[in-house]
Amino acid sequence: MSDVLFRSWEAPAGAGADVATVTDHAGVAHLVVTRHALVRQVLADPGTFRPDNALDAVTPVPVAALRVLAGHRFRLPPTLANNGGHSHPAIRAIVADALHPARVDAQRAWLTTVVRGRVARLATELHLGHPVDLYAGLAADLPLLVLARLVDLPAGGDANGSGTEVAAVKEFARSALELFWAPVDPDRQVALASTVGRFHAVLREFAATGGGLAADLRAAGHPPDVVVGALFFLLVAGQETTSQFLTLLLHRLAGEPAVLDGLRDGTVDVADVVEEGLRLDPPIVTWRRVAARDTTLAGIAVPAGTSVVLWLARAGRDPAVVAEPEAFRPGQRGSRRHLAFGAGAHRCVGAHLARMEAGVVVAEAAGLLRDVTVVRAPWCPDNLSFRMPDSFVVRRSGVAVRAA
């Protein structure tokens, strides 16, 4: 049954009850919630269902890995996603200001230029008959580069994705997603802890001296651990999830020729494509809450301390909300009522940013996907909340490979 938790995107349509208990690989029972209305109910009630466990490791961390983290002075205090306390609104307000829609929209022209350049190079490679990886060549680092411009993060490099800092941040972010949300063995946990711990030390130094968001948080009187925690979460949730979503959306579009035709002739709206992608392939598949007190959910007793897994992706396919739950139909009834960004006090503060980035990529890159053959579809490792595709390789259909 733990496969339902760690490969939830492969579950068949209609799988699972509205609320069901599932035991994971470590023997921990989770209450899995699938119905859209119930997921929203939990998210809207942070007093009963707290976010305290949002960043807890789903695989208990062994002593050896804990020692590695301790050696790097690693800490994740309640800051954003895992903060149900009084400090959350003030911290969130500072981050929200850094990601204000006006600031995000000011990056659109720059991002469009970058994406057009990348698309042109990829199109040339496809024309020559070469396979191209749309994850590595387009989607992997774009959100990180935009985020770095917005909030002055320690993620150097240029618009072509070069720079050791970019590679280091990507390695750290993916390692963090695996360490905290994947079923991993002890040896792998030690290796991941080393990567995460080393970069945490970099963040700690940057938090003490960096500008932008780090400086704003310091100026507001937040202690160093809070600054580090905010930067840590942004580097994971603020960019890695978006690069994953872009890859999965491009893959889905490659199998939707009618939608590609509509984008070309203007009968399908880019924003509708993005929303339908968020509904079917949300950046975060599930998210956790913990019951703060004895309660009930859909008539089922939920004791205090129960881990509640909110199946955001399944909520997006609720037939009570969307007309054709399993079909990719941009603009269909209910398409925009998804919970890809959560809801309530902890709704994703970067939602506008993710939508802007996805809109630019769809508008500029959809043409690449016409008449292509998928050489390697995105493959995703076991994970509770994140898909983590590692590549998406296509080649032009019917084009003979030319000599280099």
Image: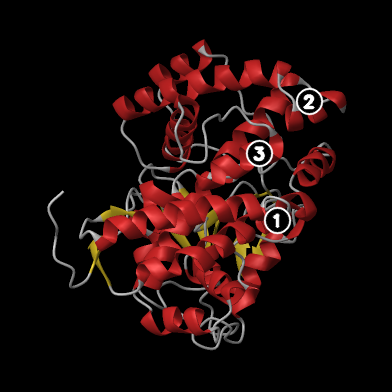
Q: Amino acid at mark 1?
A: Arg
In front: mark 1 or mark 2?
Answer: 2
Which residue is at 55% across, 29% downward?
Answer: 156
Question: Which is nearer the eye, 331 or 17?
Answer: 331
Secondary element type, mark 1:
loop
Q: Amino acid at mark 2?
A: Ala
Can you identify the residue that label 3 sits on? 149
Can you identify the residue that label 1 sits on? 347
Q: Is residue 72 above or below residue 163?
A: above
Q: Is residue 364 above or below residue 153?
A: below
Q: Position of residue 44 (x, y in %)?
A: 74, 61
In front: mark 2 or mark 3?
Answer: 3
Q: Tell me the quadrant of the picture where the N terminus can be found.
A: bottom left
Give yes or no for contact between labels 1 and 3 (Cβ–Cβ under 8 Å): no
- On screen, residue 363 versus residue 404, left or right, reads right
Secondary element type, mark 2:
helix
Q: Amino acid at mark 3?
A: Arg
In front: mark 1 or mark 3?
Answer: 3
Q: CA distance from mark 2 to mark 3?
A: 15 Å
Secondary element type, mark 3:
helix
Q: Is residue 296 above or below residue 180?
A: below
Question: Which is nearer the eye, 110 or 274?
Answer: 110
